[in-house]
Image: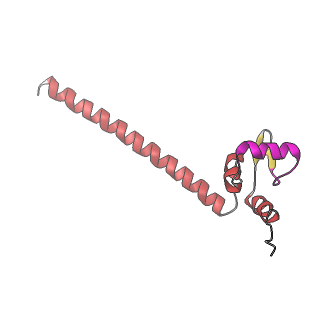
């Protein structure tokens, strides 16, 4: 067996290994994201500021501004981490409901 064939196989195996690593990495990220989505659906994992802002249709800086002003939905703060529970976001959205008058 000549060395050029041997090197060719080694290169292919290396490339396949890199592709496999990428596939596994993406699968793990998808699984983590899906788990986070399911946790939100079960109402047991609080939203980050960014996720809460998306739920309310505002920018994350709006959430920060509301906290500073003492308005907006109730939130949890542990250290520097700010989180919003789904029921608090739902309650806040309900308070914003405006009845149409005729």
Q: Quadrant of the N terminus?
A: top left
The region drawn magenta spans 59-75
x 12%, y 25%: residue: 2
x 46%, y 45%: residue: 26
Foreground pick, 14 / 94: 94
Foreground pick, 52 / 28: 52
Determine whether, in the image, residue 100 is placed left or right of residue 59.
right
Q: Can residue 78 be found in the magenta stretch?
A: no
Where is residue 10 shown, x and y percent of the image?
25, 30
Q: Quadrant of the C terminus?
A: bottom right
Could you say which quadrant of the image residue 94 lies in? bottom right
**In this view, 89 is above or below 63:** below
Determine whether, in the image, residue 37 is placed left or right of residue 95.
left
x 79%, y 66%: residue: 97
Where is residue 40 shown, x and y percent of the image?
65, 58
Foreground pick, 99 / 101: 101
Where is residue 6 shown, x and y percent of the image?
18, 28
**In this view, 5 is above or below 47:** above
């Amino acid at each position: 067996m000549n060395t050029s064939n041997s090197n060719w196989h080694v290169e292919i195996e290396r490339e396949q290994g890199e592709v496999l690593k990428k596939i596994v990495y993406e699968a793990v990220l998808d699984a983590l994201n899906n788990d986070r989505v399911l946790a939100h659906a079960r109402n047991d994992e609080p939203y980050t500021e960014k996720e809460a802002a998306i739920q309310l249709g505002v920018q994350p800086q709006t959430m920060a501004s509301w906290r500073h002003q003492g308005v907006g939905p109730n939130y949890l703060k542990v250290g520097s981490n700010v989180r919003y529970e789904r029921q608090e976001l739902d309650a806040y959205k309900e308070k914003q409901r405006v009845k149409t008058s005729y």
